[in-house]
Image (cartoon, helix red, strand yellow):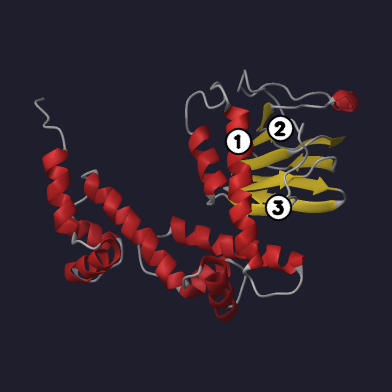
Amino acid sequence: MSGSARHPKYQSPPSSAGLDNFHPGNEVYFSSEPNYEFGPYRTGLSIKYCQSGIEKYTIDGRETVLHEGEYMVIAHDCEVYYQSTKAHQGVSIFLENKAGQSPYLVTNTSFSAIDEFGTWLSDILSQSTPFGRLGFFQSCSTILDSSHMNLNKRIDSILRAKRLTRVELARRILLGARYMHGNAMGYFDLEKVANAAVMSKHHFIRYFKQYFGVTPWHYFQNIRMELAMESIVTGQCRLHSLSENLGFSQLSAFSRAFKDHFGRPPSYYLKKSTRERPFNLG
């Protein structure tokens, strides 16, 4: 791992010989080297986010694999060992823990980065100087806490007795949800979604509805409608093409679904966005 919040660059990782003095707080480190091992070490609260490839962490003797688009919160004072075998890009955010660890955090488990915190972190990392802004670490802590408060509420809505079982089911449900986000342009295929979640179709529908409060189909439909609205207001696509791209066989079917979701037909927003779009004199 390498770099800091002030210098977000890929630099040489710290020497394993100096791990006894490795106690970062409010710092950001990057990882990208293949066939690299680091640890074991103990730190305060930290967040691991895999931007591409695969990263492996052994936390208090238990191995967890982070795939692209997943993140994990590692609890305070855990023994951590890091390993990469292939080219990848990852980010480690170490937070000072002056007030103690929040009771809401779900730690040492990987989750798809489609929740409030994961979306925020992805947006931050897409910026040219993501860690140069004032208040980054405070924002990180606040948004993480809020996001995991909601995560805990959803986990508790799953009707299984054991906490570890509910957390694992939530992790798998979010894998299915992430698959739907990444494949919204097209037809809904429940079997493929359930396979992405490593669950049977029956169990996926059952626990997904308990977690999100809607069926997988309605969740998928909501994603498609939000994508449709974005395309319409930004003028990215004609309605016929947009309808086909979203898997609707007819424009009329798309228009009905859009109106059911937003209360107005797509033509209303299309006209509105055309009026408000600046005229290009060039």
Q: Which residue is mark 1?
A: 140
Q: Is the Cβ of the residue at disc 1 closer than 8 Å to that at disc 2?
A: yes
- The numbered mark, 3 or 1, whose residue comes first in the sequence reads 3
Furthest toward the left, the residue is: 281
Residue 37 position within the rendered picture, expressed as x and y whole percent measured from the top left? 80, 36
In the rendered image of this protein, does residue 104 appear above or below residue 28?
below
In the rendered image of this protein, does residue 208 appear above or below residue 63?
below
Q: Secondary structure at mark 1?
A: helix
Using the rendered view, name the quadrant where residue 118 is placed: top right
- Label 1: few (<14), some (14–19) or many (≥20) C-alpha neighbours in 10 Å: some
Furthest toward the bottom, the residue is: 202
Please name whichever residue, 141 or 190, is drawn nearer the observer in this view of the structure.
141
Q: Residue at x 15, y 33 (%)?
A: 278
- The numbered mark, 1 or 2, whose residue comes first in the sequence reads 2
Work out how far the residue at label 3 is from the one at label 1, CA to CA, in angstroms.
15 Å
Residue 158 position within the rendered picture, expressed as x and y whole percent measured from the top left? 63, 71
In the rendered image of this protein, does residue 281 appear above or below residue 59?
above
- The numbered mark, 2 or 3, whose residue comes first in the sequence reads 2
Work out how far the residue at label 2 is from the one at label 3, CA to CA, in angstroms.
16 Å
Work out how far the residue at label 1 is from the one at label 2, CA to CA, in angstroms.
9 Å
Q: Is residue 176 visible?
A: yes
Residue type at mark 2: give it: Leu
Q: Secondary structure at mark 2?
A: loop
Residue type at mark 3: give it: Val
Q: Which residue is mark 2?
A: 95
Q: Residue at x 67, y 21 (%)?
A: 11
Image disc number at residue 106: 3
